[in-house]
Amino acid sequence: MTLTGYRILLISTPVGPLGSGLGGGVELFVTNAVQALTQRGHHITVLAPEGSVLPVAETLIPFAGSYQPTAHTSDRDSPVIMPEPSVLSAMWDYARQVQDAFDIILHYAYDWLPFYLAPFLRIPVAHYVTMGSLNDGMDHIIAHAAHTIPHSVGLCTRVQAATFPAADRYEIIGCSVDLERYEYCDTPGQDLVWLGRISPEKGLEDAIAAAQMSQMPLKILGKLENEAYWHDLQYRYPDAPIEYLGFFATQEMQAIVRNCRALLMTPKWVEAFGNVAIEALACGVPVIAYRRGGPTEIVQHGKTGWLVEPDSVGGLVEAIHRIDGIDRAACRAHVVANFSIATLGDRLEHWFQILLNSPEPKSPNSGLHSALS
Ligand code: UDP
């Protein structure tokens, strides 16, 4: 098999159409993978829920059906859920039928089914996992997949890997941004910005509290995922200098973000990566983030932003006051060097090469119920 020209069947997230914001960061993962692999001369066919849009040219096959529930809204012991008619099962049924026209399947579902199905297919499956450990059943099947088919599971960061059993079994692939879609700005206004799904695990309340304490205006952009949570925040912080602008496509979003002084990232969970960090840095916007999860592998403390003790609003305020110590050009340069589409293409291609050259699976799914070390 040559290094270029793989025929790749990419199966998108089943939690919603690409471009809707329902998938959060995974939508950017998919878009960038399509772009990175297309640039390398690979041939990509994308299966995705109906209504999906991709800003890059490729073959997109839409599927109707009910979306999967998002994993961050389930409990550790939640069972596997398949809402019928399931868009997830429809996409994988199609994949089974057309598999012989492809060299490899790359998928982005944080769902049990694809991990279970992979050994039944004739072509290798690369599982790209974009969230940390949230559910016992998923932990088990992810670790099992990495054990039975070595190199088949890719993650975003080492800190994300550490949340799963057998942390050393995963390939670390990361994410990227298309630098041409993010304009650099050296002359920001006074506003801070917070970006992301408005949902409790994202910890927006701490960013609002920091804006209130520092009396710095905060712009909020992103999908309003949990309305009760958002209403509660408005009730708790009636006088905070905040403005919710809505959810924007990348072009409009970066036009607002680039004029801001800093991005605040205040997650309460172990963020697997944190795409918003590299998107802000690409615009030259420093990142103030809790020292927790993916941002610790993106933000260079004192150079491209400040890493703050987790859950310390006082720490955020202190970092806000020190934001002028960060050189905005260094922020963009860090993304150019480490998070470009070309670097993602290198990592994906290397991953596929290893997987396609791997020996046969160690054991079939019959071993699934045995204890995993
Ligand atoms: N985002 C967007 N429009 C907005 C706000 C956010 O498209 O108005 C996107 C942002 O570009 C990022 C994603 O939402 O790609 C959030 O991803 P992240 O990895 O930060 O968090 P996740 O949602 O995966 O937990």
Image: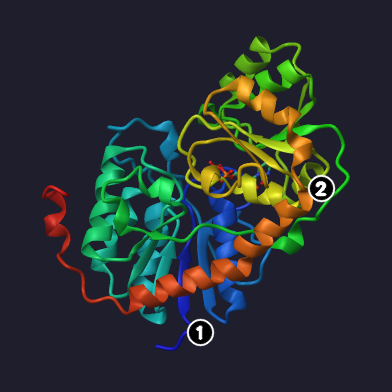
Residue for badge 2: 255
- Residue nearest the viewer, comparing 1 with 14: 1
Q: Position of residue 87 (x, y in %)?
A: 44, 52
Q: How crowded is the residue under tag 1: few (<14 C-alpha within 10 Å), some, or many (20+)? A: some
The alpha-carbon separation of the residues under discs 1 and 2 comes to 35 Å
The image shows a total of numbered marks equal to 2
Mark nearer the viewer, 1 or 2: 2
Q: Are marks 1 and 2 in contact (CB under 8 Å)?
A: no
Residue at screen point 77% across, 48% down: 328
Residue at screen point 40% across, 79% down: 103
Q: Position of residue 294 (x, y in %)?
A: 51, 45
- Residue nearest the viewer, comparing 300 with 269: 300
Residue type, numbered disc 2: Ala
Residue at screen point 60% across, 46% down: 299
Compared across the picture, whether 50 is left or right of 325 comes to left
Q: Position of residue 34 (x, y in %)?
A: 57, 67
**Which mark is on residue 276?**
none
Residue for badge 1: 5
| Up/down of 3 relative to 25, above or below | below
- Residue nearest the viewer, comparing 300 with 274: 300
| Up/down of 341 relative to 277, above or below | below
Q: Quadrant of residue 353?
A: bottom left
Compared across the picture, whether 109 is left or right of 364 comes to right
Q: How crowded is the residue under tag 2: few (<14 C-alpha within 10 Å), some, or many (20+)? A: some
| Up/down of 360 relative to 253, above or below | below
The quarter in which the N terminus is drawn is bottom left
User: Where ligand 1 lies, by quadrant?
Assistant: top right
Secondary structure type for disc 1: loop
| Up/down of 170 relative to 281, above or below | below
Residue type, numbered disc 1: Gly
Compared across the picture, whether 94 is left or right of 307 comes to left
Q: Is residue 16 visible?
A: yes
